[in-house]
Every structure is written in C-alpha cells, then in structure tokens.
Amino acid sequence: MGCRERAAKSELLRIVAIEGICAPDPSGTLPGRGAYVHPALVCLDLALRRRAFPRALRVQGPLDTAELRRNVEAAETVAQQATP
C-alpha cells in the first residue's frame, strides 16, 4: 500500500480497522477487511501520507495509527539487531 511494490503475502503486515484504530494483524485472523503494508517505517509513512488506510479499509474519517507505528518500529528494531 505504501510503496506499492508487490510482495508475497508472508512478507507483508496485515492491518485491520477496529473501532477507529489501525491494528496490526500479524497472524491474519482478525475479522474484517484487511490492508497489507511492508513492515517498514518508510512504507508506513508513504501509506499515511497518501491517506491509504481509510480508503483501503473502507472506513469514514481518520484512523489512529499510533499502535501500528509502535509495532512497525519494534519489528524494524528486531530486524536490525538480527542483521550482523
């Protein structure tokens, strides 16, 4: 969604809207419409700048993305620590 590059579903993070909040769904089991984004801040920021989440998830108004940002930041930190 953010960078618009194609990738395998397993490489992407599923996002769902729950009561006005963009919630990460790494297991892919939460109900509702989902949107996929690379678990990288660059991709997330592009999606936010384009206002892609409300459009993709078909919700009215803005969505809170604070929890999603924390999740992506944590994933990037873990990935950086794992890379020698």
Image (cartoon, rainbow, N blue to C red):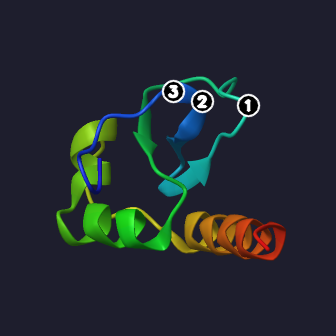
Residue type at numbered disc 1? Ser
**Residue underneath mark 1:** 27
Residue at image location 70% in from the left, 23% down from the top: 29
**Residue underneath mark 2:** 10
Where is residue 28 shown, x and y percent of the image?
65, 27
Q: Are marks 1 and 2 in contact (CB under 8 Å)?
A: no
| Label located before the other in sequence (1 or 2) | 2
What is the quadrant of residue 2 in the picture? bottom left
Residue at image location 21% in from the left, 44% down from the top: 55
| Label located before the other in sequence (1 or 3) | 3
Q: Are marks 3 and 2 in contact (CB under 8 Å)?
A: yes
Circle 1 Cα neighbour tier, 10 Å, few/some/many (<14 / 14–19 / ≥20): few
Q: Secondary structure at mark 3?
A: helix
- The Cα atoms of the two marked residues, 3 and 2, are separated by 4 Å
Left or right relative to 58: residue 63: right
Where is residue 63 shown, x and y percent of the image?
40, 62
Where is residue 37 shown, x and y percent of the image?
43, 47
